[in-house]
Every structure is written in structure tokens, then in C-alpha cells.
Image (cartoon, rainbow, N blue to C red):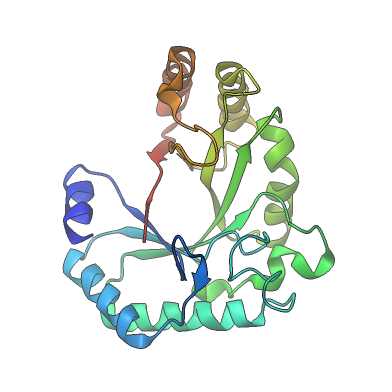
Amino acid sequence: MASTLKIIKDSGAIPMITLEPWLFPSKRPVEIDDSTLKEFATVLKDYNGPVFLRFAHEMNGNWYPWSGYQNQKRGSSYIKTWHKVHDVITKYSGNTKIQWIWSINAEDVPSEEWNEPKNYYPGDEYVNIIGIDGYNFKDRSFGNIFNKQIKYLRTNFKNKTIFITEISSSSSENNRSKWLKDFFYKFSRKYSDIPLFIWFDVNKETNWNLNAEQSSIDAFKTGLKTLIPKESKTLLEEEKI
């Protein structure tokens, strides 16, 4: 990972690292021990550059072992673990340029009061930026996916900057180029206070790759041109470890 961080830094970009506390592909949860955190902190210390660090994202979904759904429908263990990870990495990395991102899913799954994002919030002193992830699996507009949760974040976390930390649209059941045009139009106007989005460009649950069709590539390039004068930034899918 150290070599990858150097390549990103040398290119003038800022890396975003997502820490996922599980074993893949078995999907078994892991015990987070201090030695592992210290080893990772050493990498950040040697790198000594700006980095966005995202730990245990989408906890308000039901698919990850760190979710409230899989932990007695409570956020207390999540918050306790976040504090530990934050404190150990902060202490041993000595890297004051780390920006911690607490990243939620665009929908609460299940949509119940105990699963509201605020029940997992580690606290202002532990979070620099709030992220939100959302995907168009079928035929849902950008606004339909994100509106409700962004409004929730703006209401409950008024002093925090919001990033769209994962976003993408499938192409199998909709016209992705049309979807992209709507996304860039809304993002540059209704959500102009959000300075960054990360396009998930991976062939995973479906083919999220933009290069699956030329019309999507063209729509994305055109959309970017509308953002660059506004100093908005984009990144492709971040490195996950």
C-alpha cells in the first residue's frame, strides 16, 4: 500500500482509504487488535501526507458484520470500536493530515428508528467529514436515491462537510448516459455545497464501469466540464483494505 500512496501523492491527488474490519471473501468479522492498527499507522507515518480515512462504512445497512443489524440492533459497539481505531492510529501515525470520514448508506436498511445514522455517530471530535454511499441498481434518479438522507445529514450534522463517497449507476436496465446527465445537473445545482463525489467504477454486483458503453463515457466527460469551473473534484473508487 505504501507504494500506491506514493503514486497517488506524486500525481497531486489525495488518497481515500477504506478500512473494512472483516475477512474477505468469507465475510467473517475480525477482532481489531492494536498491533494491526499500529502497523497500519506506521504506513501513514512514513507516507506523511494528506489522506482521507474511512472506517467501517454503511453501518446502517444490513450486509456488513459491523452493522447495527448484525449487532443486536445497537450502535454502541460500533462507536466503541471507531474510538479505538481512531485513537490508536492517531497516536502512532503522528500524521496530522488525516481526515476521518464517517460514511453512511443512502438508505437505512431496515428503515427503523434504532437504525438511524445518528445512533452510530462517533462524535464531532472523532469525525472530520460525513460520507454517503448510494447506487442506482435499476431505474432510480440521483435525487430519489440521495435526497432524503442528505436532508437528514444537513439537519442533524450542520457543522460537517458532506462527501458522496460512493456513487454509480448500472447500465443493464436504464439509459446510464441519461442518468448521468441528470446527476451532473442536480449535483452542480441542488447539491453545490457538496464538494466531492467518488464514482464506483468496478465490475461487481453489476458492471458499474463507465467504459461499458461510449455514451456513458461521453456523458461523464461532458458532466465533468460543468463542474471543473466550480472547483468540484472527483475520484475513482478508493483503495479498500
Q: Is residue 205 left or right of residue 34?
A: right
* Vertical comparison of 7 with 80: above or below: above
Q: Quadrant of the C terminus?
A: bottom left
Q: Nearer the viewer, residue 191 or 40?
A: 40
How far from the left and from the top, in percent, is residue 219? 49, 17
| Most distant residue in the bottom direction | 34
Q: Residue at x 58, y 32 (%)?
A: 187
Is residue 94 visible to us here?
no
* Image quadrant where residue 157 sits: bottom right
How far from the left and from the top, in percent, is residue 209? 44, 30
Q: Residue at x 57, y 36 (%)?
A: 192
How far from the left and from the top, in percent, is residue 110? 78, 59
| Most distant residue in the right direction | 113
* Vertical comparison of 169 with 204: above or below: above
Q: Residue at x 41, y 19 (%)?
A: 221
Q: How many marks?
A: 0
* Vertical comparison of 88 with 196: above or below: below
Q: Quadrant of the N terminus?
A: bottom left
Q: Residue at x 22, y 75 (%)?
A: 42
* Image quadrant where residue 50 sits: bottom left
How far from the left and from the top, in percent, is residue 47? 19, 64
Q: Is residue 122 left or right of residue 139?
A: left
Q: Is residue 147 left or right of residue 203?
A: right
